[in-house]
Image (tube, coloured by chain):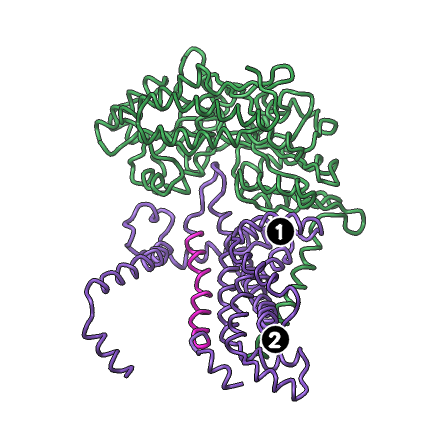
Chain colours: A purple, B green
Amino acid sequence: MAVATAVKARTRRSPAATVLLVLGAAYCLLPVLWVVIASTKSAGELFSTFTLTPSTHLFDNVAALSDYRGGLYWRWMANTALYAGVGALASAFVSAMAGFALARYAFPGKSVIFNLILAGVLVPGVILAVPQYLLLAKVGMTNTYWAVLLPSMISPYGIYLCRIFAAAAVPGEVLEAARMDGAGDWHAFARVALPMMRPGLVTVFLFQFVAIWNNFMLPYIMLGDDRLFPVTVGLSGLLNQGATQPAMYTSVITGALLSVLPLVALFLSLQRYWQVDLAAGAVKA
Amino acid sequence: MRKAIGGALAASLLLLAAGCSGSDDDSGGTAGGGKVELTYWSWAPNMDKVVEGWNAGHPGIHVTVNKQDGGDPAVTKLLTAIKAGSGAPDVMQAEYQKIPTLVSADAIADIAADAGGLKAKFPDSAWNAVTLGSESVYGVPQDSGPMMFYYRADVFEKLSISPPATWDQYADAARKIHSANKKQYLGTFSANDPGWFAGLAQQAGASWWGVQGDSWTVTINDAATQKVAGYWGGLVQEGVIANTPMYTPDWNAALNDGTQVGWLSAVWAPGVLEGNAASTKGKWKVAALPQWDPAKPASGNWGGSATSVTTQSKHKKQAVEFITWLNTDPAALKALAGTANIYPAATEATSTALTAPPAFFAGQQDFYAIAAEAGKVTNPFTYGPNVNVAYSAYNDAFGKAAEAEQSAAFTAALGTMQTTTVSDMKTAGFKVAG
């Protein structure tokens, strides 16, 4: 049946759809191609040679970027990895607990809490950056790693997703059986529900990881010490040198290229978890 | 999978703890032995290396440089930290045009008691910018940006044009260059660079703000600025000057491929030219700005900043000691000019620190002599407490005017700037005369 539809679809290929998809792919991939090619050019070639002519200076550019103020760029990369890695893990964990509780427990005020979280999904994180700064300034935590990590740990969207996942992937019967066997709340969550929610958690982790990796506003406001910067804020500083200094275009372009490579690797390696359907988790458990 | 996550989490928490304790060590406060720790926000390149010179010789006061995004972003960040009550550095680079804003937000401290004696070391225009014409002192001048005219000597030679001494001659040169090659322009009117336009208005004798008794005056739409706006509007309408902004990739490309053959800029231009158009090395020369009245040469200022002490600093006296050294000590001036690549404001710098021309202008021995002359004839100019509003009004109004390419739109844009600025000041509670 599936094979038959596939064959049918192939024979009825529509040229209009193909053109549309090729255009869409070009729209997405051309900027990437531009970054790849531009990162091979020297500063002089960047604005003088034809846009899509590659050059041979990629390694010089990487070396120049690594030399900048004693390898500060790599510290920014490490910071970003820390913010995104720890932040996304913690966020996935918090979302799993909250989502599980909202899906499988009955308690007073549950719908109010859930509606508040839903409303939180609609509020862009950018708007919250300044209030969060003022709050953290009160407890003297601005300009530390915590200033970026703590706000990254709560993701209303992640909690919302986890509630949906928990409701669909963790059957009430399984939990009941676990309780019959003497499992407490924590055990039921950690040993029974968590493994069943795994595909959903990978999604939440990836979403949050990418969001933190690309986040600019929050670290930009929170951090003053450039050794705590993530790569986004650091690169923006290289561009904004003030009118009296030239912007470091080649370093920024090379840095941008290098900074997306880990994201690409992460997506490719976590793809298989993402594609497993929800039932698979339940059966394995 | 769960185990892996747990392991990674533990590892990152360890990292985190290490990172946090690391940053605690060097963020403010006194460490053991009465040593004072100062933080310093600056965006000048290599400022950390200049400060190493201080740290080596002053074991009691240790300064840490935190490099910031240039200009507006750093000010926004400082103002946020001031409002929040914590998080501001001890010492801050402050552009001259931002000083009134910072003073009215109570962000930078009056250091007249400790720094008042430095007046003689700086040109009047720079000192006036940190005192706002009062008895208070809100910083020590660090660098200045006297405006000059940069041009492609090879193109001028080929068309046998000599560098323009007056604005009329500049217009003639622009026409000649554009008619010889339709792609070439002597310059561009940049609606993105209000500081540039303010410098040109300053040369013509404008001073956009002023203090009269206990109220402010705003004269953005005065006769001098009208003259400058009308002049540029005319050139843009005629089509002999480009109307695209500076500091864009397009503009960089135009500098490189020789379609922009002149730049009205300031003393720091060689660094920008070298960074954005390295291939044109050796082809540029510099001259004084074209004049409105050659009998009374004048210049304007574009860029430049002071070093200020913030109101949140717990070690103001030590901070003043540091910024005094940074901006007046001969060794520091030399490092500022040579390592941080800026043009020190201190009068003494021209004779001691700036003996050879910048590398990009190696052929022009009188580079700093021309700059010093421009600095000497720079007109006084007072900035107001809402320069950011006036400047963004410039971006909007002149952006539209440049697109319309109508001379009348340029002079009308000044009216928009004036009304926007005045009404914002009134809303913010400032008393405005007239």
Q: Is residue B245 magenta?
A: no
Query: Label 2: which residue?
Result: B6
The residue closer to the viewer here, B62 or B74, is B74
Q: Nearer the viewer, residue B178 or B193?
A: B193
Query: Is A267 one of the magenta-colored residues?
Result: yes
Please provide percent x and percent y for residue A230.
54, 56
Q: Determine which of the numbered discs, if any, sits on residue A132 in the image.
A: 1
User: Above or below — where is A11 with respect to A210?
Assistant: below
Residues B48 and A193: in front is A193
Tell me the chief SS of the magenta region: helix
For the residues tagged 2 and 1, is the chain the same?
A: no
Occupied quadrant, residue B215: top right
Q: Is residue B56 above or below residue B413?
A: below
Q: Extreme top residue here?
A: B295
Q: How crowded is the residue under tag 1: few (<14 C-alpha within 10 Å), some, or many (20+)?
A: some
- Which corner quadrant holds the N terminus of chain A? bottom left
Where's the C terminus of chain A, which quadrant? bottom right
What amino acid type should be assigned to the residue bearing mark 1? Gln
